[in-house]
Image (tube, rainbow, N blue to C red):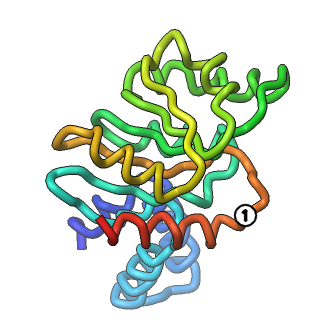
Amino acid sequence: MYESLATQGRERVHTGLAGIDSARLKKLRNTNLRECFNLIDEMRHKLEFVARIKGISFIDDAASRSPLSTWYALETIEGKVVWIANGTSNNIQKAAEFKRLRNLVENKVTKIICIGDSSLYQTVFGDYVKDILSVQSIAEAVNKAFYSSEENTKILFSPAAENGISYETQGDTFKHEVNEL
């Protein structure tokens, strides 16, 4: 049980612990609690492990549609990260929101691949990340990320911005493209 909990990330464990408190109040048995934790592992598109290929891990966090959600994902992941994000236009309000990520980006992110416009990312993170790219599709992003990464890199798809496509569609596309490598 503990190994499966360790792979779920802090957010899922915190959700599970809150569930335990609730369950204990309702006097559920430990076997039922274990089943609840296993259901938490099935949350799609939220820090979901997709695959490990040639020592490179792929993580689907397509449900993260704000800089704050992406901050949490980056904070949770250990090691070097290639961040695939939705591109977004550069404006003062958005830039202020993304600036909250600077410390994590500076210390963890080796490359940012934007699906669409990368101007905001260039403005906010250009001093910290040398490699910020614009691509036109998730397929192109996955390929560029994979073929330019070293062993033990984590490739995180965490959009951080809306783009008009549902997170389920984007997450499923990301997983499909990873499995095509």
User: Which quadrant does the N terminus fall into?
Assistant: bottom left
Residue on which disc 1 sits = 165
Vertical comparison of 177 with 34: above or below: above
User: Which quadrant does the C terminus fall into?
Assistant: bottom left
At which x and y percent is residue 141?
47, 49
Q: Nearer the viewer, residue 94 or 163?
A: 163
At which x and y percent is residue 134?
57, 36
In screen coordinates, is 95 left or right of 73?
A: right
Q: Nearer the viewer, residue 92 or 67?
A: 92
At which x and y percent is residue 129?
45, 19
Residue at the (47%, 59%) spot, across then down: 139
So how many labels did they put on this image?
Answer: 1
Vertical comparison of 111 with 168: above or below: above
Residue at the (41%, 89%) spot, across then down: 32
For this orientation, the residue located farthest to the top is 127
Vertical comparison of 143 with 82: above or below: below
Type of residue at label 1? Ile
At which x and y percent is residue 70?
57, 42
Label 1: how many Cα within 10 Å (few below 14, some 14–19, many 20+): few
- For the residue labelled by badge 1, is the local secondary structure a helix, a strand or a loop? loop
Vertical comparison of 102 with 83: above or below: above
Residue at the (60%, 65%) spot, across then down: 170
Q: Nearer the viewer, residue 59 or 39?
A: 59
Residue at the (28%, 59%) spot, across then down: 6
